[in-house]
Amino acid sequence: MNHRCCLTALGVYTPEHILSNNDLCALVDTSDEWITSRTGIRFRRKMADTETTSDMAVAAARQALERASLQVSDITHIIVGTCTPEKLCPSVASLTAGKLGAGHCMAFDFNAACSGYLYGLSICRGLLLAEPQARILLICAEAMSRRMNWSDRSTCVLFGDGAAACVLSADANAPLAVLRDVLCAGDGSLGRLITFGGGTEHVRNVGDPIGEDYFLQMQGREVFKHAVRRMADICQEALSRNGLSIDDVDVLVPHQANMRIIEAVGDRLHIAPEKVFTNVADYGNTSAASVPLALDDALGKGAILPGQRVLCTSFGAGLTWSAALMEF
Ligand code: COA
């Protein structure tokens, strides 16, 4: 059996509308200086009112399929990582499959929040072991703007919308990258630190108002500490169980949540800052889409080159965190 998990191609989509820090000053009491110095974020994308999570997923998937020279009929599974689905049912994956005309392929969503992409790689690696013929579209799509409390300055400045997709298979001839290892972890006892509602927690009746808990709420300081510690630790674990050191890593692609978190993770890992790819300034935190959007951006800018070893890491609500080693 072929044990490879190959990334054939990536595709991305970000909404056209750019929201700058100055735009946010019109909504909440904040400043470009505060946001930039505390987070490194300058811009984020905001989807149109008519756009949905699956619209973004479809756009990213189409680009990935085109770059992989595949038809949607070649795809056996569509798996979507999202914490901002447009409906609880049907899944974004099913809606995406319908819009793509994917026929009878297996389709489902999972929610690992900002760790979605790496958790998704872990799921797909397992699937490819069981079904080596599978050709999987793994998509991460997030409509974060729909769950922002636009009067909460401590959270609404941090997030952005976007989607990224990749095709994964066991047998690609000239893969874009090979997944060497992926580790996923979490701590459900800390779930209260990042939440948003809108599920079945409360009994509701037609016409009931939505409460503040529908929107994202976060204990920023606590999250910051966990994010730094957990991402640095799981990166170390991924390296050591593969007999590697940080010097063997050409590029670190961390979750793009916050520049200060990224710098602190880099410091803990003792990796040279020039090896750390960031685009948080342009997109903010796009949750599950953040790592694959950054990978695509890094490839486009020549910051990841063929033959290079890339370490990815992510952290998010749950809490969840993860690390993956890839060879491009
Ligand atoms: N503009 C201006 N002031 C703001 C602000 C904003 N956008 N957001 C918060 N503040 C204020 C607070 O109201 C507070 O004011 P006060 O002292 O008068 O009460 C002050 O800034 C400090 O707030 P605090 O929350 O302690 O700031 P901080 O230094 O921890 O920075 C975050 C806030 C959110 C930037 C920081 O905690 C963080 O990055 N956390 C991680 C968040 C994250 O990335 N989560 C996603 C992980 S997947």
Image (cartoon, rainbow, N blue to C red):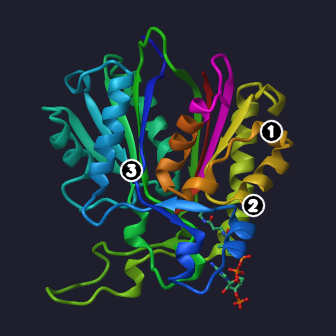
Q: CA distance from mark 3 to mark 2?
A: 24 Å
The residue lying at 50 percent from left, 56 percent from top is 287
On whether residue 303 falls in the magenta region, the answer is yes
Coordinates of residue 267 in the picture (x, y in percent): 84, 50
Give the SS element for disc 3.
Answer: strand
Q: Which residue lies under the disc numbered 2? A: 260
> Between marks 3 and 1, how big is the CA–CA gap?
28 Å
In the rendered image, which residue does mark 1 sit on? 274
Vertical placement of residue 41 versus 34, above or below: above
Residue 44 to residue 298: above or below: below
Q: Is mark 2 within 8 Å of ligand 1?
A: yes
Look at label 1 and name its amino acid. Glu
> In terms of secondary structure, where does tag 1 sit?
helix
x, y (%) of residue 271?
Answer: 83, 40
- Magenta part of the chain: 298-314
Q: Residues within 10 Å of mark 2 (few under 14, many from 20)?
A: some
Of 97 and 225, the residue lying toward us: 97
